[in-house]
Amino acid sequence: MRSFGTGDLLFILAATRWTIALSLVAFFGGGCGGLLVALARTGTIAPLRYLSLLYIRLFQGTPLLMQLFLAFFGPNILGFSIDPWVAAALGLSLNASAFLGEIWRGCIESVPKGQWEAAAALGLRYAAIMRLIVLPQALRVALPPTVGFLVQLIKATSLASIIGFVELTRAAQVINNATFRPFLIFGIVAVVYFLMCWPLSLYSRHMERRLGAAAR
Amino acid sequence: MNYVFQFGDVFNAWDELLTGTWLTIRLSILAMVLGLILAILCALAKTSGPKPARWLVAAYVEAIRNTPFLVQLFMVFFGLPAFGLRLDADTAALLAMVINVGAYATEIVRAGIESVKKGQIEAGRALGLRPLQIFRHIILVPALQTVYPALTSQFILLMLNSSVCSAIAANELTAAANDIQSRTFRSFEVYFVVTGIYLALSIVFSGVFAAIERAFLRRGRP
């Protein structure tokens, strides 16, 4: 056993970049998937509506940890091995797609029906109505819950440590195994997560309040 | 695809899976009940306690909601022994879950308490109810009825989150899956089946919560 030094601290802090990278990749992947899910859920094609509902129910009804395990072990079955970074990015993106899809469905549905009818009366097609009329209005409503979900996602990346991806939590475990200063080390890690998440939480709440005030 | 699925090894371990499922149910229900009690106390302190108590609760809620559950679990299991409090994995898991869900539920219960109209409390006072009676019948019970749906979805999240407790080898369903996996090397099959069990659990839990709502909460509602 050795003592906890500056090098260890730097190692932990440097691992934060992998937490941020994984959060961004999963947020981007989940954003793309979530948009598809939300469009399918609010669309007129019945099979797609049910399929996207099933997708949301499956991912919201099972633990994220299990989803990560399946994303890690599943591709092995198809014959190609996958490293923890790809598995974590894949699992978190699929998970985020379900949650963002459900959040954005609500936002799309919050746009009044009259907007659709007016746009259709002007001769616009589905794609143009979505892009020009509905999504821009839904975006305003979507911002606070989306930022709120980003906080969930950053915290969720800590589970990637369990399938062996070295991000913030895993780095802390590695250093803790060598120096055994758990309270100090996990305390530092908790502070780092807090510093990433808290401003986003405050921003989300602030936006929500502003939106609420505007609606009144 | 040359892979041959072999679920036999998984189903041979059905007794382990059953025990794991039961332990997950027990752990979740215990954490829900204790977490709700903690949340009611914290919400009470936050809405009508002295200033320092309000700050303390606010700090607790923000600290928990902005850090990962896994790190909280490690703090409890690995960190607390530094202060002479050595807990076994199951107790540490329960404690971490109570602390975690307590923070989320505090915000939910507080919203419920704040939704109770002032006139209701004044009416209770005018009828000669004692403060404790007012708190129980006019504030707490209607508040919990109002936020019941939000509380139950939080509890289902808690149940799903309990799988993280396998990281400190607490005895529950995911830990049972890890054991079977390390013995049989049928990783995908084990986790696939266990994912199905969790899905069934979340469906059963939401069914039970809905039944409780129908049986007790709608009746006699003001």
Image (cartoon, coloured by chain):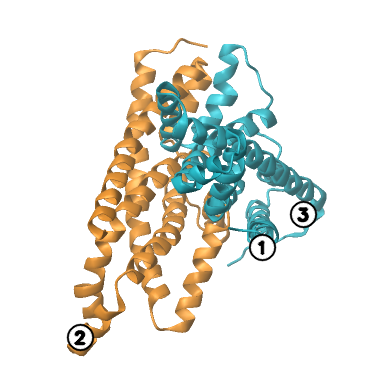
Q: Secondary structure at mark 2?
A: loop
Q: Residue A29 at what x, y percent from top left? A: 35, 57
- Dot 3 corresponds to which residue? B9
| Callout 2 crowding tier (Cα within 10 Å): few <14, some 14–19, many ≥20 | some
- Dot 2 corresponds to which residue? A124
Q: Secondary structure at mark 1?
A: helix
Q: Residue B24 at what x, y percent from top left? A: 70, 45
Q: Nearer the viewer, mark 2 or mark 3?
A: 2
- The residue that appears at 69% across and 46% down in the rendered structure is B177
- The residue that appears at 56% across and 13% down in the rendered structure is B82
- Dot 1 corresponds to which residue? B214
Q: Among the chains, which one is orange?
A: A
A138 and A183: which is toward the camera: A138
Distance between the alpha carbons at the discs numbered 2 and 3 = 58 Å
Q: Residue A46 at what x, y percent from top left? A: 46, 83
Tell me whether the residue at label 1 lies in contact with that at label 3, contact meaning CB atoms closer than 8 angstroms: no
- The residue that appears at 63% across and 16% down in the rendered structure is B85
Q: Is residue B65 left or right of residue A76?
A: left
* Labels 2 and 3 positioned on one and the same chain: no
